[in-house]
Image (cartoon, helix red, strand yellow):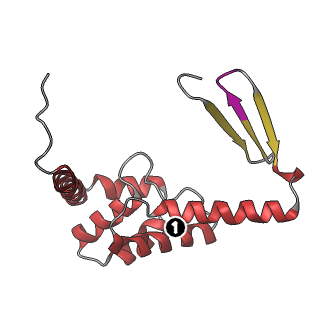
Amino acid sequence: MADRKVSKTVDDEAGTIAFEFATGENEVVDVSKFTAEIQKQLLLHGASQKLGDSYSGEDADKCHSIFTGVLKNLVDGNWSARSGGGGARISQLAEALSRAAGEVIEICVEKLSGMDEAQKKTVRDHPAVQAAIAEIKLEKATAEAARLKAELGDDVAPLTL
């Protein structure tokens, strides 16, 4: 189990979650054994967490469009469309597509949400989109560096090795 304290495995078909602890103990949770009220609370908590995670760490002006894209995916029955499969996250990919195509981000989020992974890869691999992704990453890194400099101020001793 490497360096993890606990490993989880979700079995959708069985409706169970298996927990394997680093100490060797194992527990399997069967959610059908919970009361209807607890199942409802878990459902609401999960929906709140999934939707809230969708825009975590994003700029405030992008949160709503990211949220609505993920909500649409969930309503359409697509749980994992938030990510572009190991590359740029859809929010970043949508922003890059918006810049490269000169289209509003909401349209790009909607277009991407209807694409399969191969189609998203084609978009991601386009040179104009790749350039836009690089610009976005640079902007975020520059903003983070400025934030850290402002937070740390001039009182930080230089690093010596």
Q: Which residues are magenta?
A: 19-23
Q: Position of residue 58 (x, y in %)?
A: 36, 63
User: The N terminus lies in which quarter of the figure?
Assistant: top right
Q: Secondary structure at mark 1?
A: helix
Q: Nearer the viewer, residue 124 or 34?
A: 34
Q: Is residue 29 above or below residue 120?
A: above
Q: Within the image, what quadrant is residue 44 found in?
A: bottom right
Disc 1 marks a residue whose amino acid type is Val
- Residue 127 position within the rendered picture, expressed as x and y whole percent measured from the top left: 21, 55
Residue 132, x across and y down, in percent: 21, 60
Q: Is residue 141 above or below residue 58?
A: above
Magenta stretch holds residue 1: no
Magenta region includes residue 21: yes
Q: Residues within 10 Å of mark 1 (few under 14, many from 20)?
A: many
Residue at x 75% of width, y 64% of height: 41
Using the rendered view, name the quadrant where residue 35 is placed: bottom right
Q: Residue at x 32, y 67 (%)?
A: 59
Which quadrant, please, contains the C terminus?
top left
Judged left or right of residue 152, residue 35 is right
Q: Position of residue 53 (x, y in %)?
A: 50, 59
Residue that numbered label 1 is attached to: 70
Residue 133 picture quarter: bottom left
Q: Which residue extends farthest front?
A: 155
Closer to the camera in the image, 112 or 74: 74
Residue found at x 55% / y 56%: 80
Residue that appears at 74% across and 48% down: 12
- Residue 69 horizontal side relative to residue 31, left or right: left
Would you say the magenta stretch is mainly helix, strand or loop?
A: strand
Q: Nearer the viewer, residue 4 or 116?
A: 4
Left or right of 96? Residue 24 is right
